[in-house]
Image (tube, grey):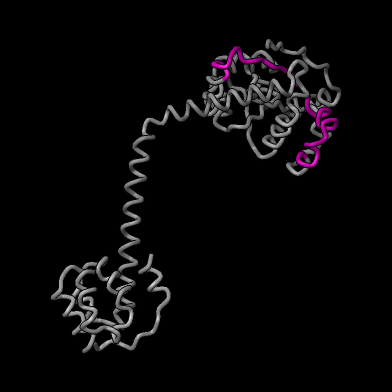
């Protein structure tokens, strides 16, 4: 759908009075999914000059529209053009289209004279580039950002030919295109998954070693001789879960121990060590055997 720029609004008496007093006029640059828009904040006194004042009036369109008027609008030529403009803004770059739009709609500044206006922008990097390239003074602060948030909320009310459904479609399409472009731009996305998998394996290895050390330490209070017979962490945990109380071990448990560790001689050694163990009496450690079971 083709959108045309609306005619400039009639001059506002309060704005003219402000300029006569030497006050700086404030313009707001808004980058929408449909195009660039420039607003003249001519009635700041209507909503106040603080962030809290703007927040309190942001939902009142009637009051906000008395303070902010549309000064110019230029639609993007196509979805590709919208994506290019969006990418440039995100990188803090002023495009030729944006420069032409500002120079066409902002008041002319005589050579050798200072501008009697400033342009409020959402992105500080974009404002810096505009000032460096054109000399147009820009500002980006909490107050300006609150005004621009209010403009975003009521934007479809300022453009007569733009329906809310059209704006939503443009935002959705641009959002998808911008996201796809960012995903494609990340050439290391496959490497990232490999790096994350390796990091996860390292983390699991550290956790398993930490649990194994705790099992050795806690069960060692009851059966300290076991750690000298079996060094493998996995076998030690299986034995601790099987034996539990060393006082219950006897010769009849040797076949089961042999099947568990695969060595009959070590199984006999474990039974003999349990009979002469110097460890403390068995006290059930719930957390220790929870770790062993896990």
141 left or right, relative to 247: right
User: Where is residue 170, by image quadrant?
Assistant: top right
Q: Nearer the viewer, residue 46 or 151?
A: 151
- x and y, in percent, of residue 90 in the image: 53, 29
Above or below, 211 against 30 in this view is below
Q: Residue at x 20, y 75 (%)?
A: 255
Residue 81 inside the magenta-drawn segment: yes
In the picture, which quadrant includes the N terminus?
top right
Q: Residue at x 58, y 19 (%)?
A: 82
Q: Residue at x 31, y 76 (%)?
A: 217
Q: Nearer the viewer, residue 47 or 263?
A: 263
Q: Nearer the viewer, residue 59 or 211?
A: 211
The stretch of residues the image draws in magenta is: 54-82
227 left or right, relative to 188: left
In the picture, which quadrant includes the C terminus?
bottom left
- x and y, in percent, of residue 235 in the image: 25, 68
Residue 239 inside the magenta-drawn segment: no
Q: How many marks?
A: 0
Above or below, 69 against 258 in this view is above
Above or below, 4 against 186 in this view is above
94 left or right, relative to 284: right
User: Where is residue 134, by image quadrant?
Assistant: top right
26 left or right, relative to 188: right
- x and y, in percent, of residue 2 in the image: 68, 10
- x and y, in percent, of residue 151 in the image: 72, 29
User: Where is residue 123, by image quadrant?
Assistant: top right
């Amino acid at each position: 759908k083709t959108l045309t720029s609306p005619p400039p609004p009639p001059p506002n008496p309060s704005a003219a009075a402000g300029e006569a007093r030497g006050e700086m006029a404030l313009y707001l640059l808004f980058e929408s999914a449909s195009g660039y828009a420039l607003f003249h904040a001519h009635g700041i006194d209507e909503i106040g000059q603080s962030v809290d004042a703007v927040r309190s009036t942001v939902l009142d369109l009637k009051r906000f529209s008395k303070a902010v008027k549309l000064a110019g609008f230029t639609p993007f030529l196509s979805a590709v053009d919208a994506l290019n403009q969006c990418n440039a803004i995100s990188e803090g770059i002023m495009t030729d289209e944006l420069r032409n739009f500002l120079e066409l709609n902002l008041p002319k500044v005589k050579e050798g004279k200072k501008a009697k206006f400033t342009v409020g922008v959402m992105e500080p990097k974009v404002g810096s580039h505009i000032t460096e390239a054109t000399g147009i003074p820009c500002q980006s602060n909490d107050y300006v950002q609150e005004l621009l948030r209010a403009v975003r909320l009521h934007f479809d009310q300022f453009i007569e030919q733009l329906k809310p459904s059209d704006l939503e479609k443009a935002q959705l399409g641009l959002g998808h295109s911008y996201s796809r472009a960012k995903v494609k731009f990340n050439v290391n996305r496959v490497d990232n998954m490999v790096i994350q998998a390796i990091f996860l394996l390292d983390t699991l290895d550290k956790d398993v070693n930490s649990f194994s050390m705790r099992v050795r330490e806690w069960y060692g209070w009851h059966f300290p001789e076991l750690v000298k017979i079996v060094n493998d962490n996995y076998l030690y945990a299986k034995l601790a879960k099987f034996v539990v109380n060393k006082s219950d071990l006897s010769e009849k448990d040797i076949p089961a121990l042999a099947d568990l560790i695969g060595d009959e001689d070590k199984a006999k050694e474990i039974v003999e060590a349990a009979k002469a163990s110097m460890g403390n009496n068995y006290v059930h450690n719930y957390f220790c055997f929870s770790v062993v079971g896990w």
